[in-house]
Image: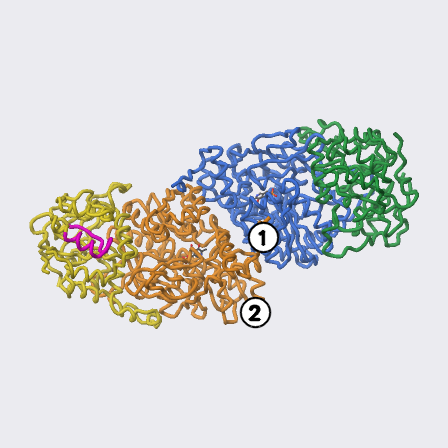
Chain colours: A yellow, B green, C blue, D orange
Amino acid sequence: MTRSEIRAAFEDGPALVSYVAAGDPSVEASKEYVEALVDGGSDVIELGLPFSEPVAEGTTIQNAIKRALNAGMTPDAYLDLVRDLDVDVPVVCMTYYNLIYQYGESEARSASENASGDEPRASGGPEEFVAAAAEAGISGFVVPDLPVDESGPMYEACREHGLDLIFIVAPTTTPERLERMLDRTTGFVYVQGRLGTTAPATRSARTRPRPSNACRTPTSRRPSASASRRASRPARSSPAARTASSSGARTSTSSPRAWRTTCPRRTSPTASNRSPRS
Amino acid sequence: MTRSEIRAAFEDGPALVSYVAAGDPSVEASKEYVEALVDGGSDVIELGLPFSEPVAEGTTIQNAIKRALNAGMTPDAYLDLVRDLDVDVPVVCMTYYNLIYQYGESEARSASENASGDEPRASGGPEEFVAAAAEAGISGFVVPDLPVDESGPMYEACREHGLDLIFIVAPTTTPERLERMLDRTTGFVYVQGRLGTTAPATRSARTRPRPSNACRTPTSRRPSASASRRASRPARSSPAARTASSSGARTSTSSPRAWRTTCPRRTSPTASNRSPRS
Amino acid sequence: MSERGTTTTDEQETRAGKFGAYGGQYVPEVLMPAVEELADAYERYVLANEDGFVDDFRARIREFGGRPTPLSRAENLSERYGFDVYLKREDLLHGGAHKLNNALGQVLLAKYMGKERIVAETGAGQHGTATAMACAYLDMPCEIYMGRTDVNRQRPNVFRMRIHDAEVNPVDVGSGTLKEAINETMRDWATNVEDTHYVIGSVVGPHPFPAMVRDFQSVISEEVREQSREKLGELPEAVVACAGGGSNTMGAFAAFAGSASLPGAPEGTHDPAPDVDLLAVEAGGSSLGVDESEGYAPNSASLSTGSEGVLHGARTKLLQTEEGQIVESHSVSAGLDYAGVGPELAHLVDEGRVTPVNVDDDAALEAFHRLSREEGIIPALESSHAIAYLEEYEGDGPVVVNVSGRGDKDLDTVIEESTARDLDAAPSMEVFEE
Amino acid sequence: MSERGTTTTDEQETRAGKFGAYGGQYVPEVLMPAVEELADAYERYVLANEDGFVDDFRARIREFGGRPTPLSRAENLSERYGFDVYLKREDLLHGGAHKLNNALGQVLLAKYMGKERIVAETGAGQHGTATAMACAYLDMPCEIYMGRTDVNRQRPNVFRMRIHDAEVNPVDVGSGTLKEAINETMRDWATNVEDTHYVIGSVVGPHPFPAMVRDFQSVISEEVREQSREKLGELPEAVVACAGGGSNTMGAFAAFAGSASLPGAPEGTHDPAPDVDLLAVEAGGSSLGVDESEGYAPNSASLSTGSEGVLHGARTKLLQTEEGQIVESHSVSAGLDYAGVGPELAHLVDEGRVTPVNVDDDAALEAFHRLSREEGIIPALESSHAIAYLEEYEGDGPVVVNVSGRGDKDLDTVIEESTARDLDAAPSMEVFEE
Ligand SMILES: Cc1ncc(COP(=O)(O)O)c(C=O)c1O
Ligand SMILES: Cc1ncc(COP(=O)(O)O)c(C=O)c1O
């Protein structure tokens, strides 16, 4: 299975990035959906690894994640699924930091060891999962609860294994923070078009959001790419993608409106040509 | 209608004093019960004038009183009943002080007058009721919530109209208090044989009552008469009394066990020959 | 209790326990020795601080009860009315109402007297709960009489009493409410008078209860005077309290009226302060007056509309028919729903020292919502009457309102009644309608 | 918040908000500016008392909240155990629990920051109620997120929030309990971050919450130290507090651990006191450990048995599967039923300064009954865990137990659970069986 680099996906202009919660409703179905989405024109697949506490998700994805977990999805099963995928677009792993952090030798992090007073996380960390993900064919990570400020070890691990660590630029992001993010960005950054979490656009912010003022502020470096995490309509919606979204009763609850797509409304996305800071 | 003095009832030894709640279940029935009790051998009738808050009564008499009030018993109806009675034994009015106190010109005690700051009770008092009771044929009063200490005006009114004011000697009464009571006693005193209120003897005191120690204490004056307010069996129970007590479904709830009878167990009752203190 | 007249008219009887013409000891003879013993204990332990009783009481009500309670400025209400409103926070006392001041005092006194058992009546359950609490704390066996109807509609308070290990004796007679419970408690006391103390729940009953309960509750006004000095720099223009039996009322007024006598009060806190208006707010219910034929008053405004009579051991102002039958009172607030009132309060009203006013059920409910919404304090429905009166108050302030208790206990009633009356002030509860 | 490393390993990141390896700010980018703004406000208003913020807070928590709360000697328990037991009475704080210290502090801070709206999550409803109270008092619009299941089983607290005019937003997702509510509140905050402050309910979440909530709650231990000086003449041998998220725990421990930093604390009350044992009592539930296959822990003993991970914005000790999925915790006490714990507490445990212990559901229920029966105080089920630990305590005392709240809210649960478990300690409720 070969797969292009994430940056390549943006080379020809806007790219369609589609999200699927892995294992909802089953591993087999996820495989089919991903392949159908790619057939239908998706340029990047964001494959969610379900975490029990998806704090950045709206109702739709929360429910999808819950179904996936109930159906038995685990990090190992997720990696197996990735290995099995027959697609030639980049697959980005979207998950929360605790799953990445805990992967591997769990006994080493048992309570009794921690109680010894040692620096507890010496025994945990993102390295093992990043290595396994790279081996399985993942191209990059989106970790919504890992802001740039906490991303040191993850950044190191990704750099070591040649994976992209993708940050999200929010409407609230300050120029100073953007600066810090770009220092660690590889692949692309998300530009979140609207305040809030992933969700259908039915609930909007009470205050009118400042539209991505960070990105509009002139900076020395341009954001490498931008994507709305939650456009209310896909920028490009191929018939096949529509088919995938309605391929089963359960799929439809991973509503298309919740899928993340590129959103070229404000800045035209281009593939990043900045390589990771060495 | 003629009637002997209360003291005369005790002249021949123990006397049977029977209680009826006036108006339970109707004025007519009360009249019949009283007459039957007298036919059956009662020497004194204690005719209860029902008060809405019978704090000294047990469940049986409380319920009787409630029925009487619901059936429309009033102080005026009570006096009419007394006038109508065709018996030749003394009738004692057993009631609470508020009914005695309020009888008569009620407007004079209205709120607006009281709010003027005048001594409020100047307009109320026992005189009117005592006068009306004397006129109707009542021989005396038992007022359980009027201890000797509060009995000044009532004592005066009774003296004026030649009625007996009967006090209750409790098992807890001290010699000093007994002394005070005997100062104001006319007719007879009740000796309450047991702690508590009027009730069937099913609930007994948690502590063993000191049996009438006041009466056993040698004093310069002997109690004029003594009666247990609540012997569990009538000292004398004539067939006719039994008939009265079972003359109707409702009568039986004014249970015979709750009737007050003389109880010659400790001191032999004798009629008082002490006249009111002048 | 020293001199006891043998004179023959009430006017000449000047015994302890009389407030003008009110008060006295109208109880069955069987209770008189107990009442005398108690009056004696009151004089020794409370008035004369024998064995340091009052010091002990003060330490315990502080440490166990959480005194002093704050005097909080109500910022939003002050703005609303244009004068300063201060709230005396008896809602923060342990148990959630001023009731503990009295219950703790009496149970402690019973202990000093060598009594081995406590009985008390309760209606809505507040006094029963406070008594049960004090008994658990002081390790005294406790039995509470409560009408069957009240047992069923006040389950949480029954739970609390039982959890404190008090026996709850349901009274099945009559309507199964407060008056039957009082009756039964009296009866228990009369039966077990030698080892048992009856903890009366308000400034009612025979002497020494009205004076003694007032003294235990007078810590409220003692603190208000001290706190006013600190926070207002002056005495308030008025003190407002709701009046049921009148214990929180007398507690809030006593130091200003100069009538309390609890040893150890800070210097000057009990000097009469005739310039401070004392407003007793009664439950106006749905309307004033008495329905004679039904024996029913749709209110419990005995101070404002009642007449003098004798009930539950004392001469006082009552809601009664012309014949003298006590009528059934009514208030949306269970704790104010009583046909009598403390004799001292009746006297202070006759003297013109206390002004009786009243507010109706709707006004009280609205005040409940207003304080909850504007100040973040859910008042007891009883206390809501005092708060409601602010809408009518015409002075310039500052005004101290006694928040006699918290309203957690009243939530169900308030929601039900607000809905039934379609009150604008009530928040919708449609969060439950799914 | 001053220096922010761009170094590449965690070990080298020494930013504010770290407690050893715990803490941090693991939140979505959209919230980072809000979190930074808050950290800045925390430094200025709280740590540096800018504009007299802390003075204002202290005055308000005193006058509105009823601080200081008493330190009461538990006479009957002291006798039972043979050492002196003192109870810190947070049950007497306005609202009935320590929660108001934090809620009032945060809502006041939001006002100083110019925020115009408050959101908060709530599980059992205690934090939601405290927040709604503080918002009513400070005139701030307030929305509370609460799982649908919790809405239905905690009706009285929903009533209280609504009565304080807070919106209650039921969350219909998932199991409809605390974690879904947190999720939704985060989402609201992320959507309305510019004018909205999120009042977190315990010493959890991203920096500055754990430090800030600790500081607001540290008034508890500040008072305990002062009161110990007066009443015990010495510091206690141990302080015992229950730990859910850990806010009452940190509040009761902070002054002894020397970790709080609220300006205006009395001289010396924050000097580290290493001789005082600090015992955090967790909910042992029905048994310890985690059922991996079910994703379920029959306890919520994250300090005693959890492992390190990242949840709700911070690195801390968690109940999780080997893979890192958070498991469902369990405790008979809703307020302790949380799979995480404050990061500072996790750190203090690793450092050996705090000793984590736990007691099971039955022991907590028994302690609930014991305190109610022996001392006349009905504790919250949460606090009952701390009280239960006295049965196992082996020192000589004096011991201070933090009674974090009152148990009125728990009556139904306790009666139901005591009956189901046939606990000897529970009083019979047959008064209702007629
Ligand atoms: C909170 C509260 N306030 C007032 C009252 C009325 O009683 P009192 O008039 O004796 O203060 C009660 C009675 O239960 C009460 O619970
Ligand atoms: C009374 C009480 N104590 C303790 C807790 C647990 O919270 P924390 O551990 O943050 O003190 C709660 C939570 O609701 C509570 O209500």
* Residue A268, horizontal then vertical, whole percent: 11, 46
- Check disc 1 and give the amino acid type: Glu
Q: Nearer the viewer, residue A70 or A57?
A: A70
| Mark sitting on residue D82 | 2
Name which residue lies at 76% across and 33% down.
B29
Q: C272 above or below C394? A: below
Q: Earlier in the sequence, mark 1 or mark 2?
A: 2
* Residue A93, horizontal then vertical, whole percent: 19, 57
Residue B254 is left or right of residue B265, and the answer is left
Give the distance between the C-alpha atoms of the residues marked 1 and 2, in whole angstroms: 34 Å
* Residue D269, horizontal then vertical, whole percent: 44, 62
Whether C416 is among the magenta residues is no
Q: In which quadrant of this rendering is ligand 2 seen?
A: bottom left
Question: Which residue is the site of mark 1?
Answer: D430
* Residue D422, horizontal then vertical, whole percent: 52, 60
Nearer the camera: disc 1 or disc 2: 1
Residue C320 falls in which quadrant of the image? top right
Q: Nearer the viewer, residue B210 or B239?
A: B239
